[in-house]
Amino acid sequence: MTQYAVRNPATDEVVSTVPTATDAEVRAALDAAAEAYARWGRTSSVAERAACLRRVAELHLERRAELAATMVEEMGKPLDDAEGEVDFSASIHAYYADNAERFLADEPIELSEGEGTALIRRAPLGVLLGIMPWNFPAYQVARFAAPNLAVGNTIVLKHAPQCPRSAALLAAIFADAGFPEGAYVNVYASNDQVADVIADPRVQGVSLTGSERAGAAVAEIAGRNLKKVVLELGGSDPFLVLGSDDLDATVEAAVAARMENTGQACNAGKRFIVVDELYDDFVARFTSALLAASPGAPLSSTTAATRLGEQVEAAVAGGAQLASAGPREGAFHPSGVLTGVTPDNPVYRQELFGPVAMVFRAADEDDAVRLANDTPYGLGSYVFTPDAEQARRVADRIDAGMVFVNGVGLDAAELPFGGVKRSGFGRELGRYGMEEFVNKKLIRTV
């Protein structure tokens, strides 16, 4: 049975629990969302929906302290990261409030023959199910909810079991912003109940951010029921160092890429691939800097820290060398650098979800690209080089949904987010995020 509970990872104390929804409560959530779609989603104007989203953005900022403190307690997020997440979430809601009318405007089609006109009109699909993770409780909801509420879709939101307070606070924000009852419904559902929700004929699509296993399970159920899905899954993003005019700045960026949210970000830099002539110097500086940045915050749970510790132990048993900032204690996992990870090492193609990096030596640019693509994942990537032509060339060759050149932390509301291969499919954010769950209806008139 799924248990919704706030367990402070810093102390391993269960602070509070929330009852899992009854089957009747889940049915009521679906009923409310379906009714809201019929009476509001299909009839409200884009301007009306945008006004509500603008108020959602304002309420995020007004309630910033409470939201951030809740994230700290639920999943151990450093306070600065939590406050930054609330701010970014507010900017996402504001972005869609500002751009919804432009994105949803009718799109004329030039006819190649015949009389009359043709256009594409973007219309809502109906009720959508969102299945959200614990690592970014507000931001992940914003990525899914903002564009879809702007379209007129209604949302049933199933949050991670360890984030029930964040879930409740966000539901209150949408209600207080003026969205009608049922437009955004939080439900503390179990996994079995989620399967029933996906199968419900009123649900038109599912968006999940989470693990490969969860994504595969949801996609299988959705496929049997002919429902569209958007999946944002794991990542083991390569960080290629092909050249540098300032190696200290490159190392600083690499540390930032690995340590965001205590290393618990799907699109964090995780595999650092360095050309031979820079490798030794980079490893020395990066190891020193990363160990000095060992987090003072816990991972999301003791279980998460144990899992990462087991992966590190397996890597070392498989022949890798480890430089570590110290021992693991409860949910607190020290930062570490693994070198000498060969393709036969058990962690070579795994995602390390925490403050531990793998560093690889590349003979040259071609070898660096080969190593970057030698992974089942394809979410994000980073390319550092002062050679602009090399950056363009390598960006084209990397198998990933996103490439960031000479910078980290460059995500923005207007930039599409998503991956390829086992990192999922579909996009969130930007105009592309709004295109996923719309009926692009052709209207041809003679």
Image (cartoon, grey):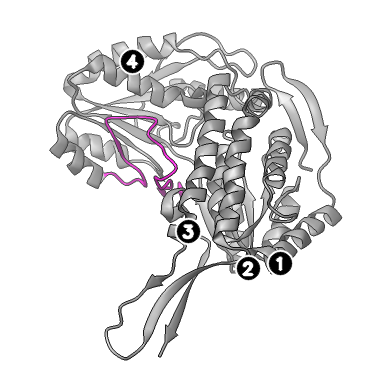
Residue located at (62% from left, 22% from top): 76
Q: Quadrant of residue 359?
A: top left
Query: Which element is circle 2 on?
Result: loop
Q: Badges 1 and 4: C-beta atoms under 8 Å apart?
A: no
> Please, what secondary structure does the residue beneath circle 3 have?
helix
Q: Dot 1, how many residues are within 10 Å of its Cα: few (below 14), some (14-19), or many (20+)?
A: few
Q: Which residue is under mark 2?
A: 42
What residue sits right under mark 3 in the picture?
101
Counting labels gives: 4
Q: Main secondary structure of the magenta part?
A: loop
**Residue 390 in sight in this render:** yes
Rendering coords of residue 412 (x, y %):
42, 39
Secondary structure under tag 4 reads helix
Q: Pointer 2 and pointer 1: residues touching (CB < 8 Å)?
A: yes
The answer for how far apart the CA atoms under marks 3 and 1 are is 20 Å
- Disc 4 target residue: 286
60 in relation to 321, above or below = below
What span is in magenta?
A: 398-424
Q: Which residue is mark 1?
A: 39
Looking at this view, is 1 or 257 the one in front?
257
* Front-most of residues 38 and 241: 38
- State which tag comes first along the sequence, 1 or 4: 1
At x 18%, y 35%, the residue is 365
The kind of secondary structure element at disc 1 is: helix
